[in-house]
Image (spheres, rainbow, N blue to C red):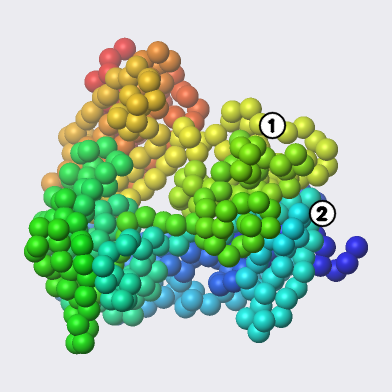
Amino acid sequence: MGENVYDVIVIGAGPVGENVADRVVQGGLSAAVVERELVGGECSYWACMPTKALLRSTSALRAARQVPGAREAVSGEVDVAAVLRRRDSFASQWKDDGQASWLSSAGIALYRGQGRISGERAVEVVAEDGTTTALTARHAVVIATGTAALLPDIDGLREAAPWSSREAAAASEVPGRLAVIGGGVVASEMATAFAGLGSSVTVLARDGVLPLAEPFAGERVTAALREAGVDVRLGAEAVSVKRDGDGSVHITLATGETVEADEVLVAIGRTPNTQDIGLGAVGLRPGSWLAVDDTLRVIGEAGEASADGWLYAAGDVNRRVLLTHQGKYQARAVGDVIVARAKGEAVQDEPWGRHVATADERAVPQVVFTEPEIASVGLTAAAAETAGLRIRVVDHDLGAVAGSALHAEGYQGHARMVIDEDRKVIVGFTLVGPDVAELLHAATIAVVGEVPLDRLWHAVPAFPTVSEVWLRLLEAYGR
């Protein structure tokens, strides 16, 4: 066969695409990835890594000020220039040499340019100079193109050159005034970050702050943002935006009120990067989210995967869970199932099998790096009830745990576990408080493993740690 023939072709070299390619190569197949921007994708340069770098310095400063003895050693405020330099380093200065080198060392071919499906198992790559390279896949093509920020149809918004999450994550300076349209994870984290870096921030949260989390989580983040000086306007809806000649942005709300800012960040959701990847060539609608079956094969307009199942979609683009770590989890399943099918091996597609992404539906862990942090896994109480489960909700004051008082003076937080009463297992867990992110994996294991509550009594938390909350929750539930 020709030199441009591979067992698997992956369109998109973000964390998901990289992991798919790596898995198939480790499984003995050949792989190529196609990337139109930077190898490493959104997470490496405009999301997970740089945004957490923006948040960490102010978070560490707050933590030090909450502990007597350390508090007295802290003087001055956060060094904004140093924070931005550290952010730049975590974004690799927006250069992908290191990640491209890793692809090469892993035996994965890289083609730079716009990848488009041109037919069954066929992909064209159009480079920046207009040259076209035709690639052929022996076994599978995987779409891992991710998503882009969704821009709402608000009068004048596009003309006002708003920030998306990308511009916020890569900002070269901190605006004096920042308006945020949205109240979800990106909106809340960026409001926290820029308020900590000195911006005067206004949040226009039409649907509330973190509306998909447990209600107490959004309430505590809202209170903390307001305490930090952020103007949080719940239910506020922007109807028009205009940028003046001097650069100022004027946002008119449905109430007739106006908000003035130097920059406006729009963070209301995501849209799939499928507009220009050749979906029409295989009977799919350009710009659409891609539906998939249990093994992440793309489902066509007829409602089923193609007979030979050569087209897959992994990561944000299939809309199952828009989180990097969950996309990488899907990538492992996709890479392994492609290898199994190529070698004629058995496919383990039962729930929790090697070739399915069962956790997408039952045990998605997520941390929101606001102040306080929110760490959750599985179902909220409301979602569990909607799913028809007979549940019991157990709450505990996280600040009442001995380890919490040692961790920080005046520690405030909350913990909740959602119990499936019929099976006596945890189906949801939420923690809100300073530094709760590192407590989450224990809850994730409990949910994924469906550990019976009777057995959890034998998982004794070390004293004095914040993890003692597990014992307090079990005591509240009773035995």
**Sequence-wise, which precedes: disc 1 or disc 2?**
2
In the picture, the disc for residue 306 is none
The reply, left or right, for residue 172 in relation to residue 175 is right
Single out the residue that lies furthest toward the right. Answer: 1
Residue 405 point in image, percent of width and height: 18, 42
Three-letter code, disc 2: Arg
Identify the image quadrant of the N terminus: bottom right
Q: Residue at x 73, y 76 (%)?
A: 132
Query: Which secondary structure lies at badge 2?
Result: strand
Along the line of sight, which residue is nearer the eye, 164 or 86? 164
| Residue denoted by label 1 | 348
| Residue denoted by label 2 | 138
Three-letter code, disc 1: Gln
Identify the image quadrant of the C terminus: top left
The reply, left or right, for residue 97 in relation to residue 47 is right
- Is residue 272 shown above or below 471? below
Single out the residue that lies furthest toward the bottom. Answer: 246
Query: Which secondary structure lies at badge 1?
Result: loop
Tell me if I can see residue 25 in this picture. Answer: no
Residue 56 point in image, percent of width and height: 32, 62
Q: Quadrant of residue 333?
A: top right
The reply, left or right, for residue 255 in relation to residue 367 is left
- Is residue 352 shown above or below 474? below
Q: Residue at x 37, y 55 (%)?
A: 269
